[in-house]
Structure formats: structure tokens, C-alpha cells
């Protein structure tokens, strides 16, 4: 009799455990979610994160708290995300360079972008642009290349730092175009912009949002874009592929988590993100930043990360930049 009672007690405890687990799983989220942003407050990644967080919070009925983790060009924030518990209560905003480009430049890896990061979905796509000041005598991409060839080593381009997407884009461009133009690294995009507008450098690479703002203000002109197709925002600017430069990548923003999210949690976050990106207000604000709202499944984002990681790895090896 005692053995029978013990067996029934064990079975009851097991059933209660299963029921509790199912309830906990079905109740996600039942507390606030932390959203890691690998950039400082007020910048483009932070603005996008807060926009998406507001709409997802309304949908999930829980606060989504933005946590800015700055350092190493975004790598510190992503490394923190990668080592967090994969339970859906720590997620992160990422952009192309921090997963597909920057990890190739470190000899000691802080995380594996293909194994440690679990994609949730895409938010937007955009591109980088080659800019000159509106006061510059350079009027087109062909004009800039001609001037660079006529004056080897005398022209310069700026970016938002050594190893940034702007820097690597410039090095790929130099090698493919056969020109000698000096790279000038700045601490950030705004500093590079001020350097260009002030005449310290001849050109710079910047995101579409920055480029759009400066073109609308009459302060800059776009000579070329790094995307596979021409940008509707800069319809007159050719892609780099048109003159034979091997660019053809969109930059992008996406939502990710530590690898290993439970499938129901991933599905809930993926669905909520898609709803947020589909909101007219979100689409309008992203477009104002020079971006194209674009949804993609977690698997599609995973494939994009892998493809971009492989492409940037080959380009970095091809131009001979050593990991540091």
C-alpha cells in the first residue's frame, strides 16, 4: 500500500511539474524584457531600438527596457548578449557590421556570430553612400576617381573608425578602382561628417540616414551607393557595381537573442517584431532615417548573417587587413 501511494505521489508531482512548465511556457513573457543596444543613447541603433521596443511592448504586454552597452564598435554589447540566458528575457538590436564584419578584425573572438547569436527577425535594410561636401568641386563618382588617379595619395576619405564598414568599404573601393586615396579614421560618424564639411577630408562613407539628412539640407551630395540596386532616395547616384566595384550588400538592422531560445518563445518574438515593423508609424520613421522597412523570418535572417559574414571575410582577406 505504501509503495502504491508513493508511486501515485511521484506521478502527481510529475504531472504538476509538466503543468507548471507548460503554464510558464505559455505565459511568456511574464516580466520585463531587456533589450541590449550595442551603441550609445541617441544614435541610430538606439533610436531604432526604442521605436521597435515601444510597439513590441504594447503587443507583448510587458515593458521592454533598453540597455545601452557601448564599447569596441558594438562588440561588447553583442558579447554580453551572447552570454545571456536564452530564455527570451534578454534580446538585442544588431546591425550588419557588428556581426558580419567586425568579428573578422579581432584575433581574439569575443563571440561567434554564427553559433552564439540566435536571429529573431529583420527590421530594415539600407546601405552606405560615398559623400562629398556640396561645396566640393567633385561632381560625380567618375570625377572623384579621375581626380584621385591624377593626384595619387593626395585625396582622402573618412570613416567612423578603423575597421568600420565605412573603412572596409573604402579599402575595397580603392583596390578595385586602382586608386591611391588616404583613409582618415574618426571617432564617430558625426566627427567624420564635420571633417568632410570642414574640408579636412575630400569624401566619406556614411549611412543612408546621414546622407539623406545632409542632402536635404543642401550640405552634401551622394556620388555612389554600396547597395545592389540604386536607392530611391538617391536615384541619380550609381551603385558601385555599375563601374565594376564588387559591392552588392545591403546593410541592415535586426533583432536577435542568445542562441537556443525555446521555439514557442522565438515564435512569439518573431511574430511581435513583424507586427511592429508593419506599423505605419514605424515604416515612416525608418524611411525618414533613409531605411527601407523589411521583415524576414528568423531563418532568413540567419542565412543573411551567414552570407554577409562570408562575403566580408573574403573582402577583408583580399585587401590584406590583419586581425588585431
Image (cartoon, grey):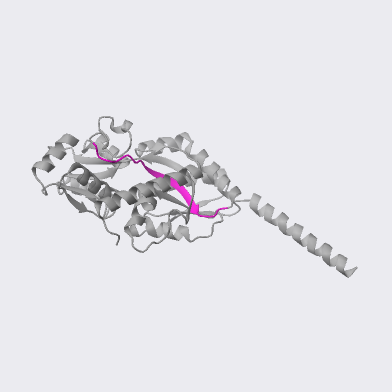
Residue 182 picture location, percent across and down = 16, 50
Magenta segment boundaries in residue numbering: 244-261
The answer to whether residue 3 of the structure is visible from this angle is yes
In the picture, measured across the screen, residue 121 lies left or right of residue 74, that is: right
Image vertical order of residue 62 relative to residue 69, above or below: above
In the picture as drawn, the residue positioned furthest to the left comes out as: 150
Which quarter of the figure has residue 206?
top left
Number of marks in the rendered image? 0
Which quarter of the figure has residue 212?
top left
Which quarter of the figure has residue 228?
top left
Identify the residue at image location x=24%, y=41%.
130
In the picture, measured across the screen, residue 60 lies left or right of residue 197, that is: right
In the picture as drawn, the residue positioned furthest to the bottom comes out as: 2
Identify the residue at image location x=42%, y=48%.
306
Identify the residue at image location x=65%, y=49%.
26
The quarter of the rendered structure image containing the C terminus is bottom left
Residue 314 picture location, percent across and down = 32, 50
In the picture as drawn, the residue positioned furthest to the right comes out as: 1
Residue 111 picture location, percent across and down = 42, 59
In the picture, measured across the screen, residue 68 lies left or right of residue 147, that is: right
The quarter of the rendered structure image containing the N terminus is bottom right
Identify the residue at image location x=20%, y=46%.
174
Residue 235 picture location, percent across and down = 28, 30
Magenta-drawn stretch contains 251: yes
Magenta-drawn stretch contains 28: no
The answer to whether residue 135 of the structure is visible from this angle is no
Image vertical order of residue 264 relative to residue 77, above or below: above
Which one is in front, 202 or 53?
A: 202
Amino acid at each position: 500500500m505504501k509503495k502504491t501511494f508513493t508511486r501515485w505521489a511521484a506521478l502527481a508531482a510529475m504531472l504538476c511539474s509538466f503543468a507548471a512548465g507548460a503554464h510558464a511556457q505559455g505565459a511568456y513573457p511574464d516580466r520585463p524584457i531587456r533589450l541590449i543596444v550595442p551603441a550609445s543613447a541617441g544614435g541610430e541603433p538606439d533610436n531604432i531600438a526604442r521605436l521597435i521596443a515601444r510597439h513590441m511592448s504594447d503587443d507583448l504586454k510587458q515593458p521592454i527596457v533598453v540597455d545601452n552597452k557601448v564599447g569596441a564598435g558594438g562588440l561588447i554589447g553583442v558579447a554580453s548578449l551572447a552570454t545571456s540566458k536564452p530564455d527570451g528575457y534578454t534580446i538585442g538590436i544588431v546591425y550588419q557590421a557588428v556581426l558580419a564584419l567586425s568579428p573578422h578584425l579581432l584575433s581574439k573572438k569575443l563571440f561567434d556570430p554564427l553559433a552564439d547569436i540566435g536571429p529573431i527577425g529583420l527590421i530594415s535594410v539600407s546601405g552606405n553612400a560615398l559623400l562629398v561636401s556640396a561645396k566640393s568641386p567633385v561632381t560625380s563618382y567618375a570625377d572623384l576617381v579621375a581626380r584621385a588617379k591624377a593626384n595619387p595619395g593626395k585625396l582622402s576619405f573618412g570613416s567612423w573608425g578603423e575597421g568600420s564598414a565605412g573603412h572596409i568599404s573604402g579599402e575595397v573601393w580603392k583596390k578595385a578602382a586602382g586608386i591611391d586615396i588616404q583613409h582618415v579614421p574618426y571617432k564617430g560618424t558625426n566627427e567624420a561628417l564635420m571633417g568632410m564639411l570642414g574640408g579636412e577630408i575630400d569624401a566619406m562613407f556614411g549611412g543612408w540616414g546621414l546622407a539623406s539628412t545632409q542632402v536635404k539640407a543642401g550640405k552634401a551630395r551622394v556620388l555612389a551607393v554600396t547597395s545592389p540596386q540604386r536607392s530611391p532616395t538617391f536615384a541619380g547616384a550609381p551603385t558601385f557595381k555599375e563601374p565594376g566595384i564588387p559591392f552588392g550588400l545591403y546593410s541592415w538592422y535586426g533583432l536577435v537573442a542568445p542562441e537556443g531560445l525555446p521555439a514557442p518563445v522565438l515564435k512569439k518574438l518573431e511574430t511581435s517584431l513583424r507586427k511592429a515593423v508593419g506599423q505605419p508609424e514605424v515604416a515612416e520613421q525608418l524611411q525618414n532615417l533613409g531605411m527601407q522597412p523589411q521583415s524576414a523570418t528568423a531563418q532568413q535572417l540567419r542565412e543573411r548573417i551567414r552570407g554577409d559574414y562570408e562575403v566580408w571575410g573574403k573582402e577583408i582577406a583580399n585587401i590584406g587587413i590583419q586581425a588585431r
